[in-house]
Image (spheres, rainbow, N blue to C red):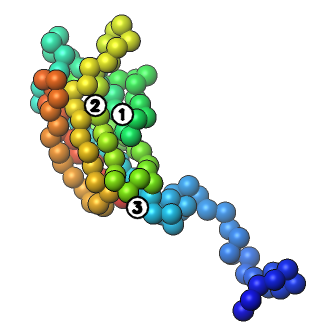
Amino acid sequence: MTFSKSNLNLLPESLFTELTADQTQMLEGGKRVIISKITCIKPGDLDGTDELFFRINGKDLGRNNPLKMSAGTTRNVSVIADTFDTLGFRIQLFDAKNDGGVLMVGNMSVSGISGDFLRRTKFSGGVYDVTYSVTN
């Protein structure tokens, strides 16, 4: 059937349903990363505690409410980021300093392959285990 102005009203109404952001992302081929757990093996800060926040693909997440992490601390979190970049995600962990500065304590690239993962990241003396999943 060829569509024209005269027969446009014959189209089912369901074709014009508004999509949620998640549905749109799935149709367009985007990916989502969900960090669900973080474990500090060794903090990067010399004082023994990191005030941890995340940066995913350049966007700070949790910087205003950092997690206090010391060796052996595990936190269940829900840090979510979306991308349409076929290369995946760049996940960085930072220790927020009192003077407003930051110290990177973790840095990893995550592919767009769907699944559940556990990765160890080391940077500037910090060592962290990151549990995450990648979905459509």
- Of mark 2 and mark 3, the one earlier in the sequence is 2
- Of mark 1 and mark 2, the one earlier in the sequence is 1
Instruction: Tell me, for residue 136, which label it has, or none.
Output: 3
Q: Residue at x 50, y 59 (%)?
A: 25
- Of mark 1 and mark 3, the one earlier in the sequence is 1
Q: Which residue position holds label 1? A: 55
Q: Left or right: where does residue 39 sit relative to residue 19?
A: left
The CA span between labels 1 and 2 is 6 Å
Mark 1: which amino acid? Arg
Quadrant position of residue 19 = bottom right
Mark 3: which amino acid? Asn
**Callout 1 crowding tier (Cα within 10 Å): few <14, some 14–19, many ≥20:** many
Where residue 131 appears, as percent x and y from the top left, is: 23, 45
Residue 124 visible: yes
Q: Residue at x 72, y 92 (%)?
A: 1
Where residue 84 appears, as percent x and y from the top left, is: 45, 54
Q: Left or right: where does residue 76 sit relative to residue 8?
A: left
Instruction: Tell me, for residue 93, which label it has, or none.
Output: 2
Instruction: Tell me, for residue 33, which label it has, or none.
Output: none
Q: Nearer the viewer, residue 121 or 36?
A: 121
In the orientation shown, which residue stands out farthest toward the top? 99
Residue 71 visible: no
Quarter of the image where the C terminus is located:
bottom left
Where residue 76 appears, as percent x and y from the top left, is: 28, 38
- CB contact under 8 Å: marks 1 and 3: no
- CB contact under 8 Å: marks 1 and 2: yes
